[in-house]
Amino acid sequence: MTKTIMNLTLPAILEEIDHVLEEEPYRDYQPLLRSMEMRQELIAYTLSRVHSRYRVIEGHERLTAAVRSLSLTSEERLNIEKVVRQGVYDLLKAVHLQNSASNSSSSSQIISQTELADCLTSVGK
């Protein structure tokens, strides 16, 4: 019988990333933050900083049932939200620093210091 190890925390992380990116301060940066590369960076950032729960799924067991069986505490959900927001902050900061260093002329990914400061101020709220 086939067994699979599943991270039950990952769906909650993905949900929180989507929730955070829908908020007003991030709307201007959605194309950048929703790119596959940046999304993967944010997922990896968050997974490496939160406690994850795993479950062994038997071959016949439904994955959706396993995911539904996980109930996170309020504290765990708040921690995930905090880490996602910090990850967005760090990613935007890294993009800004990278663009500043390379003096790239690609306006779609350049974030002005004022825009970054406004976004980062909103993150702390």
Image: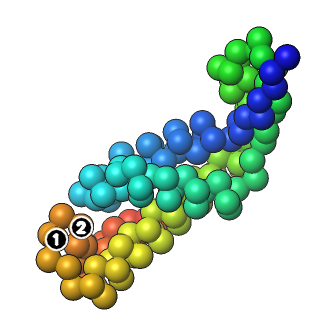
What residue is shown with label 2? 109
Q: Residue furthest bottom?
A: 101
Q: Secondary structure at mark 2?
A: loop
What residue appears at the point 58 percent right and 45 percent down from the top-left corner? 13
Work out whether 107 lies above or below 28: below
Residue 96: tell me if it is visible.
yes
Q: How is the image coloured?
A: rainbow
Residue 18 vs residue 106, the one in the foreground: 106
Residue 57 vs residue 52, the one in the foreground: 57
Residue 57 position in % (x across, y down):
79, 24
Report if the CB atoms under discs 2 and 1 are less than 8 Å apart: yes
| Numbered label tally | 2
Residue 117: tell me if it is visible.
no
What residue is shown with label 1? 106
Dot 1: within a 10 Å radius of its alpha carbon, few (fewer than 14), some, or many (20 or more) residues?
A: few
Residue 3 placement: quadrant: top right
Residue type highlighted by circle 1 = Ser
Dot 2: within a 10 Å radius of its alpha carbon, few (fewer than 14), some, or many (20 or more) residues?
A: some
Work out whether 8 lies above or below 81: above
Residue 67 relative to residue 110: left or right: right
